[in-house]
Image (spheres, rainbow, N blue to C red):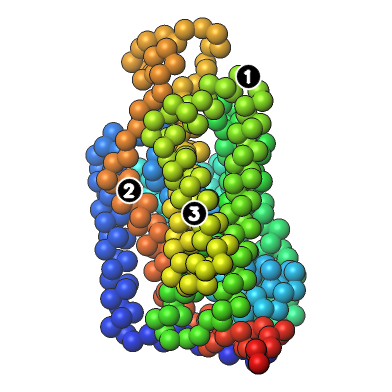
Amino acid sequence: MSKIHYREWGIPSPTYWGILIFLGLFIAAAGVSVLYMEHMGHWVTGMTNQIVWGTPHVFAVFLIVAASGALNVASIGSVFGKKVYKPLAPLSGLLAITLLVGGLLVLVLDLGRPDRLIVAMTTYNFKSIFAWNIYLYTGFMVIVATYLFTMMERKANVYTKPMGFLAFVWRLALTTGTGSIFGFLVARQAYDAAVMAPMFIVMSFSFGLAFYILMVMFMYNLDGRPVGDGLLNRLKNLLGVFVAGVLYFTLAYHLTNLYVTENHGVEAFILLNGGVYTTVFWMGEVIIGGLLPLAIIFHPGLSQSRCWIAAACLLVLLGGLSKVFVIIIGGQAFPMSIFPGMTIVEGSVFDAVNGQPFSYAPSLPEVLLGLGGIAMAIAATLVGVRMLKFLPVSLADEAVDPHYSAKP
């Protein structure tokens, strides 16, 4: 294992600016969508009095969860002492911050009036998990930024391990808080479950690592820098474990709900007769986001192809969006049991009559806002690696793996 040298992302300027302009188109479209929704009001979205969290919240929660998981690579190197992962740590920390910022931007701009965030930052109800999340999100960015400083400043390297441990614990708390938003909501039958918190933690491992692998392959391929097959196989196999973990917790969640008779209605809605939500669950969450990536990752032939590894990562991300869509919007679409055992009264306040699900159709501004958040996270990451030395010159196995030995 040779000494690791870091260097800025060195692709030609026309290529670099072309990528930023392309991403800027999505960011600009998101900005126009925000102004349109703020000026016209939220009636132009697909959200209603019953489904108050729409497509922007799907993208926001997805990015926030992925941000926590993106830091997992750095944690493996610093906290668990795996030397092969240490050169990957700076990019891991940067990506964690940019993904979180992208997700929070979507969340804040979807308020209709972003200035309302001032109220959330100055008035706290600590019985609400949302109040705790203000501290968890801002604290995460400060801690990870300090963690990055200890890694990149030679004189501060002695503090890298304790800061890495603090960042590891904090990100677990952050993802627990995000999952608890749904786990503590007793009004929605699809949400009220303690397993939500650990399931979100495993989801973060899966989404964040998939995002990380794609970014590494993209940046190193464009810059002509080597990435070792052994290192890529480590990351790919780890992703497979996390994907399997997400499927396990999904199974545990639904089996637990099926055990309780009062939840049979919501389970039938998600698993059997929920229309688009059932389709997205089975096709998007289970097959596209779970079974297909596992088949690629552990296939003896396909797993050796970098194109197929990239495809598996992309499938995991698409499946992740599908999973968050089913959790957030599918959970709201199932009618609330306000008066158990009684007939639902028809009126202008509720769209659901006699147990019929609420309707929701994503609007173009909502989708553009969500895509803009992803584009912002990617653009901020690319600017960061272009300006500062986050990337090792080489990720070849002989450069990063202390146990590497060339085959005879």
Q: Nearer the viewer, residue 5 or 41?
A: 5
- Pick whichever of labels 2 and 1 is earlier in the sequence: 1
Name which residue lies at 63% across and 51% down. 245
Kind of residue indicated by mark 2: Val
Q: Is residue 280 above or below residue 331?
A: below
- Can the viewer see residue 82 in this picture? yes
Q: Secondary structure at mark 3?
A: helix
Q: Secondary structure at mark 2?
A: helix
Neighbours of disc 1 within 10 Å: few (<14), some (14-19), many (20+) = few
Query: x and y percent of residue 339 in the render?
Result: 53, 11
Q: Quadrant of the C terminus?
A: bottom right
Q: Quadrant of residue 233?
A: bottom right
Q: Is residue 252 above or below residue 147?
A: above
- Residue carrying label 2: 367
Neighbours of disc 2 within 10 Å: few (<14), some (14-19), many (20+) = some
Q: Quadrant of the N terminus?
A: bottom right
- Pick whichever of labels 3 and 1 is earlier in the sequence: 1
Query: x and y percent of residue 197 in the render?
Result: 64, 43
- Residue carrying label 3: 292
Q: Nearer the viewer, residue 226 or 64?
A: 226
- Residue carrying label 1: 261
Q: CA distance from mark 2 to mark 1?
A: 36 Å
Name which residue lies at 30% across and 78% down. 17
Q: Nearer the viewer, residue 97 or 218?
A: 218
Q: Quadrant of residue 5?
A: bottom right
- Can the viewer see residue 104 in this picture? no
Q: Is residue 98 above or below residue 359?
A: below
Kind of residue indicated by mark 1: Thr
Query: x and y percent of residue 65 in the render?
Result: 55, 53
Query: x and y percent of residue 44 in the render?
Result: 26, 37
Mark 2 or 1, closer to the camera: 1
